[in-house]
Amino acid sequence: MSAHPHSPLPETAPVSVITGAASGIGEALARACAARGHRLVLGDVDQPRLHRLSEELRAGGTTLIAQTCDVAHRAQVQQLADDCAAHFGAARFVFNNAGVALVDPLASMSMSDAQWIIGINFWGVVHGSQVFTPQLQSQPGSAIVNLSSIFAMLSLPSQSMYNASKAAVRAFSDALREELRHPVGQGKAAHPVHVLCVHPGGVKTRIVEQARVGDLQGIAPDAQTLRNNFLQVARTTPAQAAAAILRALDRRQTRLLIGTDARIGDLLYRIAPSRSSAWFAALARKRRGA
């Protein structure tokens, strides 16, 4: 789906690109950026939800373009960047938010599922960062926001590939930040680009509802129970997460933990990196037993 903007805002209004924009944190970011007067470039694989959100935001006066985009495919992300440049010029903020979940132990996991989650959660961040960097370097005060997770630090059984994908985002973001802090070989016209890496805890999104679920033995009796359990422990709303991200961006933070659970998890990791995942997994088992 591709849509053209209407009622253009002044060219000084910043352009924000958001992947995974049709629901969850991405949708909340779209609403929050619209409230700030940003022009929006929205991408998601869920065309009907993306269309509904786009029409609602347009009705409220937001100028935007929206299109179906699978971030695992670089060509589709490049098309998003090309359309952004054609309609608005250079992006100032890029939110690499699209993400999925996979719950399955390694013994029964299919490699196609493993490649699926890495393609979206990690390569999607790489694609979004790479194709938009030239635009961002032309804009003073520009930034990339990459969505990782507290599971970049803590790990749970049955979520090895999710853990791996989010840890990769953290390491990638740390290196990218230093690359873009002092651009090399880009000429004097290249502006530094700020990089913020976000580590949410439990956020009430559709990620578990949409997850690929395999063998749940020892985790939950069935997929619906798994989803219900997640919603019970997830304390943060998408709107709260989006507000925290934009505050962190305003403050030029490089790292953001969202939710008390994320802050506690990070503290455990700092105290005992080699034991924190075992403690966390034991706590999860205790909760399931209760």
Image (cartoon, grey):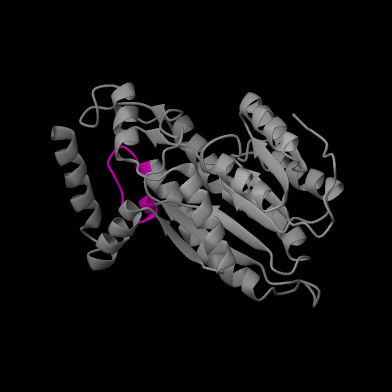
* Residue furthest front in the image: 60
Task: State which quadrant residue 199 falls in.
Answer: bottom left
Q: Is residue 220 magenta?
A: no
| Looking at the image, residue 214 lies above or below residue 147 | above
* Quadrant for the C terminus in the image: top left
Q: Which residues are magenta?
A: 150-160
Q: Position of residue 11 (x, y in %)?
A: 84, 56
Q: Position of residue 63 (x, y in %)?
A: 78, 43
* Quadrant for the N terminus in the image: top right
Q: Is residue 155 magenta?
A: yes
Name the residue rendered at 82%, 50% in the picture. 9
Task: State which quadrant residue 47 falls in.
Answer: top right
Magenta stretch: helix, strand or loop mostly? loop
> Can residue 68 be seen by looking at this rendering?
no
Q: Is residue 58 left or right of residue 129?
A: right
Name the residue rendered at 23%, 57% in the picture. 276
